[in-house]
Amino acid sequence: MPQYRRARISGSVIFITCVTYQRQPIFSTEENIHLLRHAIAQTRRERPFEIVGAVILPDHLHFLWQLPPDDCDYSSRVGIFKVLFTRALRGQEHPSKNLSLSRQKHRERDVWQRRFWERSLDEQQDINHYLDYIHYNPVKHQLASCPHAWQYSSFTRYVEKGLYSESWACRCETPLSTLPDFSKISGLVGE
């Protein structure tokens, strides 16, 4: 069995990517996005953390979370919100009959990929780069023409704070001459 090592740095900012099982577009409905937000809010009540940045795409999620100063356990928080969302989505119905024996053995459903991607960030420059990545992701996946056109991200919140201009990476009026470069992180984030 593989041994996964996760960085555990108390109070760090963590970039997290969670992907749905077999890339199902579970988050393509307003109702499921509401269930997800509720699951994350409940997780934050049980195990506090700040959401620095987020984007919800039909088949995956990206987050930047700031953990409390004396805490490094982001993994249990991911587990909690995944379980809460799965229960809310599926209720107490039995798992699909098409699940693999491994998923049945581990009592997993057909909602999430088993693992998630994460990276601890400690430099503000890295945090800003990953925040740009999160906000540009709907454009990258051709779900929106510009970051401001995707309503399921923290981009608008940052525009309201004056930390991004609304026209950042915008293609509405004129094509971008250069696209943001995420080549250094693209292979690390689960896309």
Image (cartoon, rainbow, N blue to C red):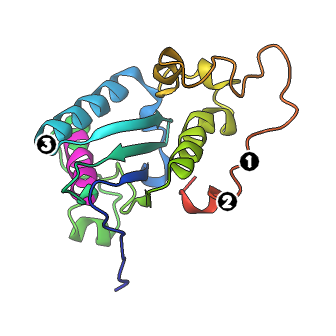
Element on which disc 2 rests? loop
Closer to the camera, 155 or 86? 155
Q: Is residue 137 left or right of residue 40?
A: right
Instruction: Count neighbours of disc 2 (C-alpha within 10 A) and say few if under 14, some if 14 to 19, many if 20 or more.
Output: few
Would you name the residue on which mark 2 appears? 184
**Discs 2, 3 touching: Cβ within 8 Å:** no
Q: Which residues are magenta?
A: 75-85
Q: How far across and how far down the image is residue 30, in percent?
A: 39, 21
Q: Which residue is rendered at x = 35% and y = 67% of the image?
A: 100
Residue 51 against residue 182 in the figure, above or below: above
Q: How far across and how far down the image is residue 188, in percent?
A: 56, 62
Q: Which quarter of the figure is the N terminus placed in?
A: bottom left
Instruction: Give residue 181's mark.
Output: 1
Q: Amino acid at mark 2?
A: Lys
Instruction: Give residue 92's mark.
Output: 3
Name of the residue lying farthest toward the bottom: 1
